[in-house]
C-alpha cells in the first residue's frame, strides 16, 4: 500500500488493520473532548490519538513509524473495513 492510498482511506474514514513483524495494528477513528481523532494501536496495547494524517505517519512503535510499517507490508497483510 502506498502512503497516498493510506491517506485516501484515512480521509474517507475507512478502518485499517495490518500485520507487521507478527503483531496486529489498527487505525480507527473517534471523538475525544469534542475533537475528531485518528487512533493507532497495536491490538490490546497502548493507543495513540492524533489530529491529522501527517501526525499519524510519525507515530512510532518499537522504533518504527507508521509510515515505515505501511510502506513495508504487503497488501495481503492489510485489511480494510
Image (cartoon, rainbow, N blue to C red):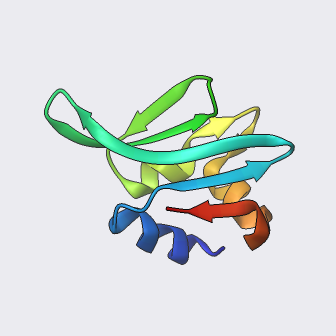
Q: Position of residue 19 (x, y in %)?
A: 75, 50
Picture coordinates of residue 81, whole percent (x, y): 49, 62
Q: How many labels does the image show?
A: 0
Q: Residue at x 47, y 56 (%)?
A: 15
**Furthest residue to the right?**
22
Can you say whether 27 is above or below 11 in the image? above
Nearest to the observer: residue 24 or residue 34: 24
Residue farthest left in this picture? 34
Given residues 57 and 10, the one toward you in this image is 10
| 34 sits left or right of 55 in the view | left
Residue drawn at x 36%, y 46% is 29
25 left or right of 47 in image: right
Give the quadrant of residue 22.
top right
Q: Is residue 77 left or right of residue 53?
A: right
- What x and y, as percent, mark residue 57? 54, 53
Rendered residue at 64%/33% (across/down): 43
Reply above or below: 62 against 17. Answer: above
Which quadrant holds residue 41? top right
Q: Quadrant of the N terminus?
A: bottom right
Q: Where is residue 37 in the image (x, y as percent from the top left)?
A: 31, 42
Amino acid at each position: 500500500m502506498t502512503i497516498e492510498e493510506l491517506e485516501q482511506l484515512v480521509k474517507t474514514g475507512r478502518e485499517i488493520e495490518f500485520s507487521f513483524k507478527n503483531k496486529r495494528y489498527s487505525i480507527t477513528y473517534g471523538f475525544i473532548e469534542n475533537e475528531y481523532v485518528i487512533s493507532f494501536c497495536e491490538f490490546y496495547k497502548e493507543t495513540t490519538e492524533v489530529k491529522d494524517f501527517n501526525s499519524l505517519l510519525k507515530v512510532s512503535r518499537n522504533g518504527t513509524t507508521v509510515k515505515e510499517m505501511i510502506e513495508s507490508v504487503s497488501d495481503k497483510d492489510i485489511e480494510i473495513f
